[in-house]
Image: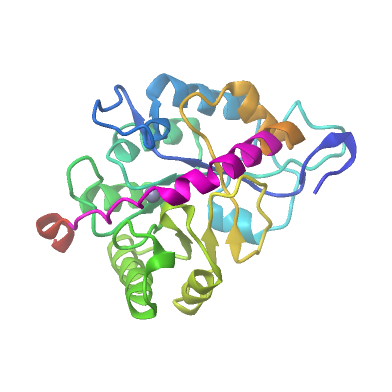
Amino acid sequence: MSGKNGNHGRGGMRVLLFHAVVRERPRRASWRERKYWMGIDEFRAHVSLLAEGGYSVLPLDRAWQTRPSRVGNSPTLWPGQLPAPVVLTLDDGHASAGEVVWPMLREAGMAATFFVNTATLGTHGHLRWRDVRAMGASGASFASHGHRHADMTALGCRALDVELRMSKDLLEGWTGQRVEFFAAPYGRVNRRVVDAALAAGYRAVCTSVPMPARRGSAKVSRIAIHTGTSPEELCGFLDGRRFPYWARRARAACLAWPKRLLPVPQARPAAEPEAAR
Ligand SMILES: [Zn+2]
């Protein structure tokens, strides 16, 4: 993965993962969830960093299937070095995706892919179907985060298949877009989930493994950007420095066992009235 100049996986895509972007974090957010609620100013600073750094922000499908090309003008690149494409993804279909994130990204001329749960669209705090359609019409890409927000590795074959196909069909019907990527809730992925997703017509499954992602791979690694992720750390990820990746993986390894002892939250309930429309 490392190359000259100490860069880490320089040629891979940097697929960044965000969640909610809010003015105020809800008081009832659990300690587990707190890091996923980012402030608006913090998100704006990340967008400015990408814009001012000349990073090439591409839609996921384009970055996944195209070879590196001379796009962007990052001052951090060495002469002759090809910039790694950056992809912005947001999970969970939080209402802020439509209220804050997409307007800000559109203004900056940046693409993004929103991974939503089709059962929770229209429930409190989430995007509505009409938001999804409006965002899709103005250039946002949508992809599946499952029908419910369930741990896919814990489902039987039939339930897994329903999650994958139902969310894909509903999203394709409502946006008119091809839905080709799936992001596993809680980052829980195994071989069976990947195989089922490919069989259901997806091109790849997105994970939360903090590494640059390989183009054309059936698993797309994503780097979660939390509240408190500093501009320096973000630059480190984007420019392929080793330390931020190493630090993130070391932290994940330390927390892996304690996390396994905690129960996975229940899948979120479906919204009957809105989702059905
Ligand atoms: Zn999620």
Q: Nearer the viewer, residue 12 or 52?
A: 12
Q: Which percent across, then down, holds residue 228?
A: 50, 23
Looking at the image, residue 7 lies above or below residue 152: above
Q: Is residue 273 left or right of residue 105?
A: left
Looking at the image, residue 95 lies above or below residue 194: above
Looking at the image, residue 21 lies above or below residue 188: above
Q: Which percent across, then down, holds residue 72?
A: 69, 37
Residue at the spot 39% in from the left edge and 66% down from the top edge: 154
Q: Nearer the viewer, residue 125 or 98?
A: 125
Quarter location, residue 22? top left
Q: Magenta region's main secondary structure?
A: helix
Q: Nearer the viewer, residue 31 or 213?
A: 31
Bounds of the magenta segment = 246-270
Q: Please tell me whether residue 266 belongs to the stretch shown in magenta.
A: yes
> For the view shown, which residue lies furthest in the left direction?
273
Residue at the spot 27% in from the left edge and 54% down from the top edge: 266
Residue at the spot 34% in from the left edge and 59% down from the top edge: 150
